Image: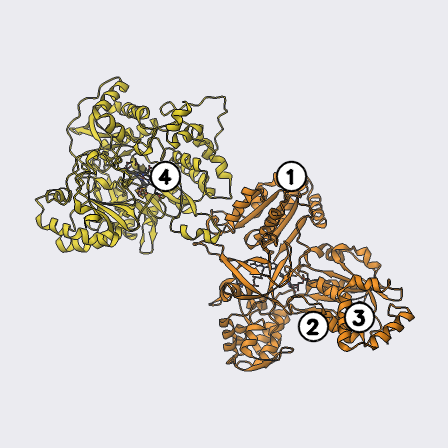
Amino acid sequence: MSDKTLAKLSANEGIKIRSNYLRGTIEDGLANLSTGALSEDDQQLIKFHGSYQQDDRDLRPNRGKHRLEKAYSFMLRIRVPGGVATPAQWLDVDRVASAYANGTIKLTTRQAFQLHGIIKTNLKRTIKEINDSAMDTIAACGDVNRNVMCNPNPFLSSIHDQVLKAARDISDHLTPRTRAYHEIWLDDEKITSSEVEEEPIYGKTYLPRKFKITIAVPPSNDVDIYANDLSFIAIVEKGTLTGYNVAVGGGMGMTHGNEATFPRLAEVIGFCKPDQVVDVAEKVVLVQRDYGDRTDRKHARLKYTIEDRGIGWFASELNRYLGYKLKPAKPFEFKHNGDRFGWVEDEAGNFHYTLFVEGGRVLDTADYPMRTGLREIAKIHDGDFRLTANQNLIIANVSAKKRVEVEALLEKYGLAQSHKRSALRLNSIACVALPTCGLALAEAERYLPDVITNLEEKLEQVGLRHDAITIRMTGCPNGCGRPFISEIGFVGRGPDRYNVYLGGGHAGQRLSKLYRQDVPADQIQPVLAPILEHYAKERAEGEHFGDFVIRTGYVAATAQGNDFHKNIKPAALPASR
Amino acid sequence: MLPEHSPFSPEQRQTLETLIAGLSVPQRFWLAGYLSADETATAVRAPAAPVAATKLAILFGTESGNSEKLANLSAKEAKKRGFAPAVKNVADITLADLAKIENLLVIISTWGDGDAPETATTFVKELTTTTLALPKLRYSVCALGDTSYEKFCQTGKDVDARLEAFGATRIFPRQDCDVDYEDAHRNWLDGALKAFGPAETSPTVSIAPISAQATVEYGRKNPFQAELTERVLLNGEGTSKETWHYEISLEGSGLAYEPGDSLAVIPTNAPDVVEGILKSSRLTGSESVALNGSGEKTVADALREDFDVTALSRPVLTKLQAFAQSKKLATLLAEDAKEQFKDYLWGRWIADAIADFAPQGISAADLVSILRKLPPRLYSISSSPLAHTGEVHITVASVRYHAHGTDRKGVASTYLADLVQKGGRVPVYTNTNKNFRMPASGDTPIIMVGPGTGVAPFRAFVEHRAALGQTGKSWLFFGDQHYTYDFLYQLEWQEHLASGALTRLDVAFSRDQPEKVYVQHRLQDRAKELYDWLENGAHFYVCGDANRMAHDVHGALVSIVENQGAKSRDAAEAYVEDLKKSKRYQRDVY
Ligand code: SRM
Ligand SMILES: Cc1cc2nc3c(=O)[nH]c(=O)nc-3n(C[C@H](O)[C@H](O)[C@H](O)COP(=O)(O)OP(=O)(O)OC[C@H]3O[C@@H](n4cnc5c(N)ncnc54)[C@H](O)[C@@H]3O)c2cc1C
Ligand SMILES: Cc1cc2nc3c(=O)[nH]c(=O)nc-3n(C[C@H](O)[C@H](O)[C@H](O)COP(=O)(O)O)c2cc1C
Ligand code: SF4
């Protein structure tokens, strides 16, 4: 590449090129004990290894006064393709969380584990111990394919086995091949410079941006396919998996005040057979690798490639890369994107218990020793654990004889009551935000529970306690909690200030629309309470909240991303209030 | 009349007598002070002392300099009384030299847990392991110590016993001094000097006491009231430690210091602590008491300003018993109850003892009669005078603990933390420590091991080298509990590393991972480079906790030399002993 083209490229492209397949100077950085931080470039590279440098934002203001640098630590994201982990793996993550992290386990919106607060001097041993437990962190972040999601469907275990295998195959196939990860964290031999090293799929510069893949099994859209770059929708005919519809071009992230950025729904472009899944995944990645915008990180996701060149262009280009044509898509229907809580029995006679985990944060509190309870269960559990895309946890494949024991422990640690909550709370998602997230503009995980508590009073009054309404809060418009496809969405604009979005589809199939901008935190309840009351009184039979607010004119419907910033009612903007 | 044996020719005596006779008392005092202040001048005026003068060797063994001060003071006094004194540090003599001495005064302190001062260890070890015959030696020992330690004045006692065992004559009984040692020393010196030679009366003796004070300098008797100009908490939110950085102005004091020196702080007791002892004594606090020297005071003021009202010790309890006549205390003080006695002392204060053994209370006069004077506390200076003109900085860990059902605190560390506001005054004086000095050459590499507050002097070292633009390599080993909260002066170290004033930094934080990691482990991790540095002439400094750290670091050092230098254990120990002798291995531990 000539310097001229280099110059145009976004900074991260240069970092990737110079990094020698993601090595950079990470090893020297780890050895420097005078600071808990890494160099700017290495901070970008370490993401590809599954970690983000962060600092405790609660402590930021006073650190300098104590003659200390920021309270740096690292977040570690552990890949769990399809969200399925063994009890042994659960116990390892649990142990590491206490030994090196902040004592909590975060179940993410992409069915992965996250640990927070790992200081630099402990990072290597943490990653090593995670790998010893047959899990890894490589490509959990960075400009590569991320943790592959798949519906943890407890009902049809035979189908689940197949989609889970597909998810794992895709994940393995798209995992970077660089030895850097093994050299830096697992003390493998260094590759001597003579040997040429290959990234057959990604190449030296990897992808223009992160890339996300899911597999859904209708009628559940729990993995939120519309928010992903690439999704496979399992088509099950007479109990057998005949193939997958292919959907591309979804994403959430946008930037306040920049209308060239917007959330976008994935579009279904065709159908492929089960044995074509890995190939299709690879070729979609390759098209994005070759055509994605590497000059502007805010315009680099597949959704913009497709927005700019058209879905038709993409479909034909993909067929060209494939060397064969995708078949026409098959009919399917999503009914919801939430989880179903409590016990269910599957076709094979095994039992599954879905546990509500508020904000996906597994921890012990004085009155709710959730983490201890799950540890005790993991010790005797003979099935597996499944992380859901809604930040909840399924204690899966419990044999009939073990169920009694598990139930006893659920009772003992108060976990049996976990879903005796309002349907609103059970259908909530909050991203991490403060204090660890470096991009947070406002609280989310620490604040949404209060917002819901304030609303529950109203719900009780008007009798909506058992009506599922999806409600999601994120600390910034990056949309980690997928707030733009929920019926009620809060997105941080600044300390204690949120944009309120309404009208998302109950199954995550429709984008929402800005209802009120810059609502002070304490005004959220007054803003929403009347609408909920109205919904309780005048909703049509089986009408979802997201549809109701559009019919009754609170917001206009959003058809697709390019229309997200349009048709916003004047009342939404502070100026006119 | 000037004495026969005074170091003057008859003619000189003649002139002097007429001269002195013609002087007013103030003039005499001034002259005495002037002469005693200026050794060289006197030396020039009076020709070398004739054989007539009795030779007197004054040996001292010191850690923080008190014994040395007293040795010099003793020399001045001895000279006035016609002796020819020679002051020496025991570190600089061998046992063989003892044989050449006829008249000897020893002033030596005790450290650690009944150990000899760092620089005196070799001498004391030889003294106790070999046997000599010193029939001609006449001697007396002044032992410095602290009654709050179990092995009070142990080193002095040992030295005294050994000399006697060698057949030497103890011409004056040993004096054991507590931390308020001035008076005890003066009396001992007077007695010992009289015992040695024909003691003199006027005019010298009448002049002597004054001349001792005549040289005006800030010290424990008259500390400098310094302004506290800045106070910074060095631990971050989330820590379980409390370490303060204090900046103190020395403007106008004329007090000077070098890196390695320490600052003495004279604290006052906290109001609640005074309340406590008044309560258990059943006193209101308004009772007035007489203090020798400083007149009358209310007992509350006296307890706050003048006395050590917390530290329990055998002497205090023995004196208390005189008033208490308690059976319980009697059994505790019994020779065979040493263990119980120790257990009782742990975590208790004098107020507890009064409540336990004198429930009826104790009169104000009796109370102050059982207490010792409030001792100053030393703090390693953490600033370079070149980097902070007119200032001195210290780095202090607040002592706070819970024992026997109540929260307790250290006197001086919490006096600074709780009772002195920014802009307030702190009574201080500087304390030279010749045994903890930067290398003469700025090119000499230095290795600094200073976990916790032990890092203090090394901040001064590095600042000093930076200020002087010295380019010698420097390597700091620091440690504490948590990297994130307890990395004392982290931002400053980063700057020094960037500027090159500090070459290397290794850290050990004990509580960041399941297993405990301390500085000695980091030393081991770096064994090879470390040995290379030593082989290239590096000086090795250790500061901080004496009880465990200093000992473990010493062990690590020896085994590093043993392994890296492929030496036998003995050879390695000799190598390290050599480092000490050549002042390349220095410690400031407490
Ligand atoms: C943990 C998690 C939220 C949660 O509470 O579960 C999360 C947390 C973060 N996300 Fe995310 N994202 C998470 C799912 C998502 C999703 C939802 C999804 O993938 O289904 C999205 C929206 C979908 C999408 O990608 O568009 C999402 C869109 C982003 C973006 C915006 C990307 C964009 O194209 O605009 C960023 C910022 C960026 O990449 O520049 C981001 C960045 C971040 C970072 C790493 C902030 C940063 O870059 O410094 C957050 C770390 C916070 C912390 O302290 O842990 N995260 N992030 C989710 C981890 C998923 C996983 O296991 O891999
Ligand atoms: C040469 C030298 C240099 C020094 N440099 C420094 C320095 O740089 N920084 C620094 O902070 N200190 C330094 N010190 C130590 C300092 O002089 C004081 O000893 C220290 O601050 C404690 O004094 P204090 O008056 O606060 O506590 P004190 O009133 O003297 O109380 C201390 C006593 O309290 C008791 N005690 C303490 N903790 C407990 C516990 N957990 N349980 C039961 N009993 C307990 C013990 O009997 C202990 O002896 C140095 C000492 C020396 C000799
Ligand atoms: C860390 C430390 C340990 C001490 N240990 C003892 C001891 O075991 N026994 C004792 O009598 N005095 C002990 N002392 C008191 C000293 O001997 C006393 O302060 C003396 O005045 C110091 O004299 P120097 O400056 O000549 O060393 C100790 C003092 C310190 C600071
Ligand atoms: S949405 Fe924003 S605040 Fe929330 S985790 Fe993602 S990046 Fe952080």
Amino acid type at image mark 3: Leu
The answer as to whether callout 4 falls within 8 Å of ligand 1 is: yes
Mark 2: give few (<14), some (14-19) or many (20+) Cα within 10 Å.
Answer: few
Amino acid type at image mark 4: Arg
Amino acid type at image mark 2: Asp
Q: Which residue is mark 4?
A: A77
Q: In the shown orientation, is residue A509 left or right of residue B296?
A: left
The residue depicted at 51 percent of the width and 40 percent of the height is A32
Amino acid type at image mark 1: Asp
Measured as percent of width and height from the top left, residue B487 is found at 50, 50
Q: Earlier in the sequence, mark 3 or mark 2?
A: 2
Q: Are marks 2 and 1 in contact (CB under 8 Å)?
A: no
Query: Distance of mark 2 from mark 1, alpha carbons?
Result: 50 Å
Q: Which residue is mark 2?
A: B183
Quarter of the view holding residue A336? top left
Q: Earlier in the sequence, mark 2 or mark 1?
A: 2
Mark 1: give few (<14), some (14-19) or many (20+) Cα within 10 Å.
Answer: some
Q: Are marks 1 and 3 on the same chain?
A: yes
Q: Earlier in the sequence, mark 1 or mark 3?
A: 3
Query: Distance of mark 3 from mark 4, alpha carbons?
Result: 79 Å
Q: Which residue is mark 3?
A: B193
Q: Which residue is mark 1?
A: B532
Q: In the shown orientation, is residue B108 left or right of residue A24?
A: right
For the residue pair B266 and A98, the one nearer the viewer reads as B266
